[in-house]
Amino acid sequence: MARWLPRSTDLTRFCQKLNRVKTLEDDMMETSFNRCLSTIDLTLLGIGGMVGSGLYVLTGTVAKEIAGPAVIVSFIIAGFASLLAALCYAEFGARVPKTGSAYMFTYVSVGEIWAFLIGWNVLLEYMIGGAAVARAWSGYLDSIFNHRIKNFTETHVGAWQVPFLAHYPDFLAAAILLVATAFISFGAKVSSWLNHVFSAISMGVILFILIMGFVLAQPKNWSTQEGGFAPYGLSGIMAGTATCFYAFVGFDVIAASSEEARNPQRAVPRAIAFSLGLATGAYILVSVVLTLMVPWHTLDPDSALADAFYRRGYAWAGFLVAAGSICAMNTVLLSNLFSLPRIVYAMAEDGLFFQVFSRVHPRTQVPVIGIVVFGLLMALLALVFDLEALVQFLSIGTLLAYTFVAASIIVLRFQQQKGDVPAPAPSGQPNPEPHEGPSGGDLKEYESFSDKLQLVDRDKSKEQREPGQLKAAFEPYLEFLSDFYPGEVVTVAVVTLMVSAICLCSILVFGNTHLHLPTWSYSLLLVLFSLGFLLSLLLIWAHEQQHSTQTFQIPLVPLSPALSIILNIYLMLKLSYMTWLRFAVWLLLGLLVYFGYGIWHSKENLREPRPQRVSARYVVFPGGSLEERVQAVQPTSQPATRLSDSNTDDCKR
């Protein structure tokens, strides 16, 4: 029975496979894509992903049902919370200008299985998100024509009463997705041009709404007679913040497009900052106008802006609002269809997903197969499925990606950069570093062991320490941490920080409602987990981090990513249990794909050296240096063994 149990070495090797990180190329600007997108192109892609139907629907819903006119404060807080996540994406997009967004960022810093699961969830997020927007687009256009399209379909095709299926097949939603798929297939430049057109119309309509809205504004609508500015109090503002947070989830399309940017080191951070700032400003100003035009408690949640103009006697303005809404939804569709195939391409290029999706068309320089296949799947979802129950699933995938990207920023910031080497020795002293010997790249020459010991002592005494090492000021108090490899303590501290954040948020969310904890235990657990979170944060801060001026870096690390982590976890725990159940089922399917295909076809798996028997032989040269040569010895290669033995005898003599 014991012989069937896995050995410890096998388990260690298996865990190493799961947590191996991606090896980046020396020239990260080399790509099979067409680097043709400017900062303006990326900015408009980000705006298109964020300023969609939410501007026309979400503002009215939150204002009437959750926060009142204080929806303005909710959008300000949500914009700041999104900024924390956006800055993490900006740093990664500048440092790793490769397509894949959160999947790629997690792969280069945390590990393979975590990256695959992030990519797997983002894949479903984009598919459901695109299909849901297409159905909203269809429903909005149908409402303009008094639901004639819906009535015609139900009369001539039929209605369904099947769980998880729509009440009727939405051919219009499927058709708009197929048309968008065709345009995306023509290349990044065509997609960008089309996004420019729709974004320009949408922003023109928003500008009209703001000008007309401020002309028609009535400050009395914020007065106490109408319920005041914050009728639902602080709890309503925070509940509105949780809902408004999801209005800003589209900025990751910029990071997914970084491999097609001309100058990603500058364009990606700027585009994320500009698009998030403009989107936040648009949401705040439209909320101000909407709640000043009509009393907040009389808003129509389904079409708040159009209804507000209609009630003020400007029914014709409703057509402009409808046009702006449709154009805004078009930009969201393009954003989803633009990002999804590129993330699938990144996974397939790394060997974690089916290789057919890594093919790039030689003329259009886009992954056409991925665009067509997932465009058809998205159209099928919009055609037959009831997506209302699945829309909440979008939130958990996005928040999980934000959490891992924030954790990846901390881990990567405290790791040694690729190619880091110790400073050269002073002039007049022999170089103690290894270099190639006279016989080629297989030989390495070293000085005496005393020189090596002096090198170690000199490294310890250097004032400029490497990333991941304990700061000199903390060494007298935390000397026992100096024996760990650089970055090892930080990685453990990040895991502890995330566990503490999960426990802390669980107590905050479920402590009084589901767990019914007594006051003393509730307070005690809050204090304990808060201390664990803060101590982990301080332990990370006590180590040296990378300081680079070549690319953008998020300020206040590790504080900024840590705040993003705890906020994302809190919002995830606020989701319904059915969302978590669906999430668990989707994760299980992803694990089947990974262990059935990805782990065996991973390019990192092919890079791993095969285990070989090795023998070492030492040759003393007249100069007194010691050269060590390690060569593989095959069991059947007797001459190599005799040669090694004879050389050993020569050394003894």
Image (tube, rainbow, N blue to C red):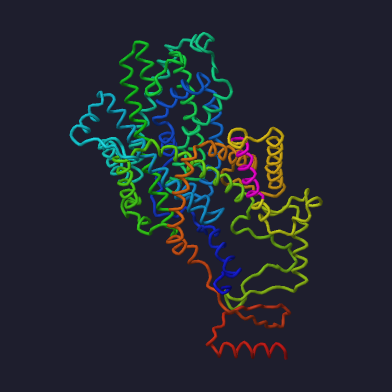
- In the image as oriented, which residue stretches furthest toward the left? 156
**Considering depth in this image, is 91 or 402 the residue closer to the camera?**
402
In the picture shown, does residue 223 fall above or below 302?
above
> Which quadrant of the rendered structure holds the N terminus?
bottom right
- Side (left or right) of 549 relative to 121: right
- Magenta stretch: includes residue 153: no
Q: Is residue 587 visible?
A: yes
x, y (%) of residue 107? 52, 54
Residue 15, picture quadrant: bottom right
Question: Where residue 344 sits: x, y (%)?
Answer: 40, 51
Along the viewing direction, whichever of 165 and 387 lies nearer the viewer: 165
Q: Residue drawn 63% across and 70% down? A: 435
72 with respect to 182 (left or right): right
Residue interval drawn in magenta? 493-509
Image location (x, y in percent) of residue 90 = 53, 42
Which of the 4 image quarters holds residue 639?
bottom right
595 or 447, which lies in front? 595
| Residue 261 visible within the image | no
Question: Residue 5: image x %, image y %?
Answer: 56, 70
Q: Is residue 74 left or right of residue 450?
A: left
